[in-house]
Image: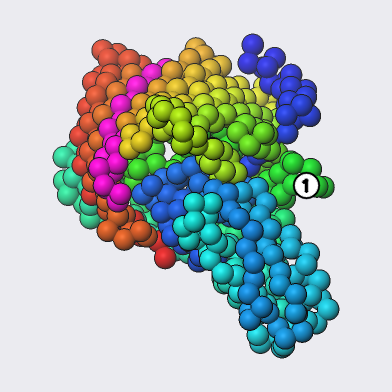
Amino acid sequence: MIKQIIKKMPIVIVVAMFISFFVPNSAHAIPAFTRANNVECSTCHTIFPELNEYGEAFLKNSYVYFGKGKKKAVEKPKSTLSTTAEAKQTVAPSGGGVVKGDGNADILSKLKAGMMVSTDTAVISVAPVQANDGDVSHGIAGSETKLEGVALSGIPEQLPVSFTANLHGTYDPKGINDIDFSARSFKLNAGGNFKEKVGFFGTYLIYTENVDKNANTSATPTNMLGKNDIGELFLVWRHALDSPINIKVGRFQPKLGLWKTNNKLSITNPYATYSYTVGSSLFKAEQPQDAVEASMIFTNRLFMAGGIVNRKNQNTKEWYLHTSVKFGGADYLANEPEIDLNKEESIFDYLTLTVGGYGYVGTNGEPNTTPGRTPVQNYYYRAGVDIDVLYKLFRLKLSGVRGEDDNPALTYVEPPASTYVAAIEGQYTILQNLIGSLRFEYQDDGANLIRRFIPTLAFTPIENLKVAAEYKHVYGISYKTTGNTEIADKIGTFGVTFSF
């Protein structure tokens, strides 16, 4: 059954891509974005790295900043232009934001005509944007002063690089050390866009603590050129050939669920629906892979993505599709809905609902590389649904996935495995920089039946520094062994994450 689905998937994917056209993404929080766009971290995050709706719009538009809501056109004072540029200029809004770089042909034509005092003077200096309600909003993305050569080439004036570090203290009575303090990870991040035509992002893992809780050694990469040290590295061709389609290529986490690995309040516990494995298979929905992805935002509120994964040492390709739709709140281009002040207040004025679904079909194991030898492979699929509900200070996340593996142990001895995993998490914003959450997870992966309770309290004393306390209570059974072995664990974690 699964093999037949895989054989038909190329036709299905091609047809779906032709009909719908899709969108790429990866969610990362790095201060380089705030420096480049002259905004605060809270513009795109609740408590970093968890994204709010404006962060989602920034992500879905390949790191091009649209501004928060609709903006009026801004007149440039004559005093900010060179003496030869006499006419005042207007920076026109586009898609709820501002056209920058190559998008403003008027400014670039003046640059190319040599209408600057010298290469050492600023190209432009844009005044603060006035929002429709009269309040002064963020400075326009790209409004910082630039040299002529930098502006013409499209190279970011500021080096778009950031570092992210995690420090943890863990209490685990079942570990070798009941209390363990560790420098968990240190990563180098880079991201941005070139003239709004090409988006880019990369993550390099400089250091990581050994993930085995019973090990007393650390794992520092010895080969700094090793491909396993790169978490993600990709380019996005925005609006390819002047179409609404974006093309993403490189190593990245395929767009499946609504939330990416680090798009969460917790610092140590990923969502089980994205992180569980089956049998001998190492496949996780959240793992970065070498892939090509096409995507598009349709009617501002419908987002679709689809791609092809090139898994090493396999004869077949893997395929996936994602679609999500948003009701209420700001749309995927950061435009907020019109509000009728004469109308009586309604619950729908504060309600935002996002629903997403995805499917992934793949193969892993040992390919048929030797003539006459039967390949030992596992054909599998994952189908999931996510729901994100936001109402004032309360947020609810629901996630569920069903999977099927026809040879999970890669031996053809054990029967196929059906998996069912679900998670529900409620969040409440206690203060602007203090959020509490409670998550419950149910996991039946074909060999274990596990339940988890994960409460978390996260606080940001300053926007690029996050302090979180979380607790994980695990109980269940392993019914793969004789007698159904009991599973139980209690782990407390206090962590600090900072980025600069």
Where residue 439 appears, as percent x and y from the top left, is 31, 30
Q: Is residue 430 magenta?
A: yes
Q: Height in image: 190 above or below 353?
A: below
Which residue corresponds to the image point at 35% horizontal and 22% vertical from the top-left? 442
Which residue corresponds to the image point at 36% horizontal and 49% vertical from the top-left? 47
Q: Residue furthest front?
A: 342
Which residue corresponds to the image point at 67% horizontal and 69% vertical from the top-left? 155
Q: What secondary structure predominates along the stretch shown in magenta?
A: strand
Front-lying residue, 372 or 124: 124
Front-lying residue, 178 or 169: 169
Q: Which residues are magenta?
A: 427-448
Where residue 87 appears, as percent x and y from the top left, is 75, 75
Q: Please identify the quadrant where the C terminus is shown.
A: bottom left
Where residue 471 appears, as percent x and y from the top left, is 22, 38
- On screen, residue 392 versus residue 474, left or right, reads right
- On screen, residue 369 versus residue 359, left or right, reads right
Q: Which residue is mark 1?
A: 240
Where residue 75 appears, as percent x and y from the top left, is 64, 67
Task: Residue 193: tell me if it is visible.
Answer: no
